[in-house]
Image (cartoon, rainbow, N blue to C red):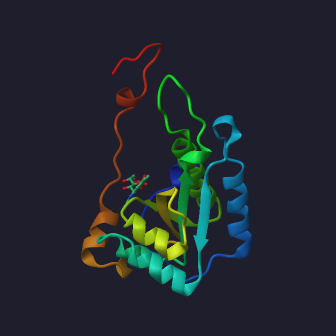
């Protein structure tokens, strides 16, 4: 089980200076495309940034502590707008955001399948990201993902290396799963 893409995915921070093949990217596009969505709205818009100037502008909009991501050969931005929501009347769930989260996981798992590492980030200046990529106002930037081949932790500064070397943790199963009724 631990060999499956689900357990080989993780978010670390060092990247090799190696471009991602067009074929790998195209397989990831297809995986993202086939993500399920509420009422099949497919609200996600996913921008793969490789152009040097755009990449630099986008990197500059990342928060302090996420500077390592500038070394990733590709930065990805997931965005969506409320106009593409499937709205329900009994509870204001944002399915356009929920669905985009699922597309993001598809992308991250597709990356693992290609031997790549994707690291999702919420640490960015949303206005800066929008300006860098010409994203219209009505769209929310939901996530920036660094994408590339994993490098060695030795390439990282001390503070970032410590983050990568820290053990990964999760809640216990009983804290997140129950049988038959809400029992937490
Ligand atoms: C929406 C979202 C935002 C995140 N933002 C950041 C971030 O800004 N910087 C960072 O280093 N990691 C960020 N992470 C990575 C999480 O810290 C990481 O997924 C979590 O600690 C679990 O570790 P794992 O991905 O290795 O399983 C983010 C993850 C998600 C899903």
Q: Position of residue 92 (x, y in %)?
A: 47, 32
Task: Identify the residue at horizontal 53%, vertical 25% (top origin).
Answer: 89
Q: Is residue 25 above or below residue 177?
A: below
Quadrant in which the C terminus appears: top left
Tell me which image quadrant ligand 1 sits in: bottom left
In this picture, residue 67 sits left or right of residue 46: left
Instruction: Give the residue at x 63% y 36%.
Output: 38
Q: Residue at x 60, y 36 (%)?
A: 86
Q: Residue at x 52, y 56 (%)?
A: 138
Instruction: Locate residue 96: give its quadrant.
Output: top right
Q: Is residue 153 above or below residue 178?
A: below
The answer, for residue 113, to whether it is visible in the render is: yes
Q: Is residue 42 left or right of residue 132?
A: right
Q: Quadrant of residue 112?
A: bottom right
Relative image position of residue 137 (x, y in whole percent):
50, 61
Residue 154 image position (x, y, % from top left): 36, 79
Name the spot of residue 130 as percent of width and height, x first: 48, 68
Q: In front: 172, or 19?
A: 19
């Amino acid at each position: 089980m631990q060999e499956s893409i689900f357990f080989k995915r993780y978010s670390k921070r060092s990247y090799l200076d190696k471009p991602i093949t067009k074929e790998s990217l195209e397989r990831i596009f297809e995986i993202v495309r086939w993500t399920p969505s509420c009422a099949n709205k497919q609200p996600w818009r996913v921008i793969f940034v490789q152009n040097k100037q755009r990449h630099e502008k986008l990197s500059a909009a990342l928060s302090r502590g996420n500077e390592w991501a500038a070394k990733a050969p590709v930065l990805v931005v997931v965005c969506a707008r409320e106009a593409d929501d499937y709205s329900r009347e009994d509870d204001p769930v944002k399915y356009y955001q929920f669905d985009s989260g699922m597309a993001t996981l598809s992308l991250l798992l597709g990356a693992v399948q290609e031997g790549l590492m994707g690291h999702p980030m919420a640490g960015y200046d949303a206005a800066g990201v929008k300006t860098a990529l010409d994203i219209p106002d009505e769209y929310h930037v939901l996530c920036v993902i660094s994408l590339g081949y994993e490098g060695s932790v030795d390439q990282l500064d001390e503070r970032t290396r410590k983050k990568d070397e820290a053990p990964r943790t999760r809640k216990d199963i009983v804290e997140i799963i129950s049988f038959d009724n809400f029992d937490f």
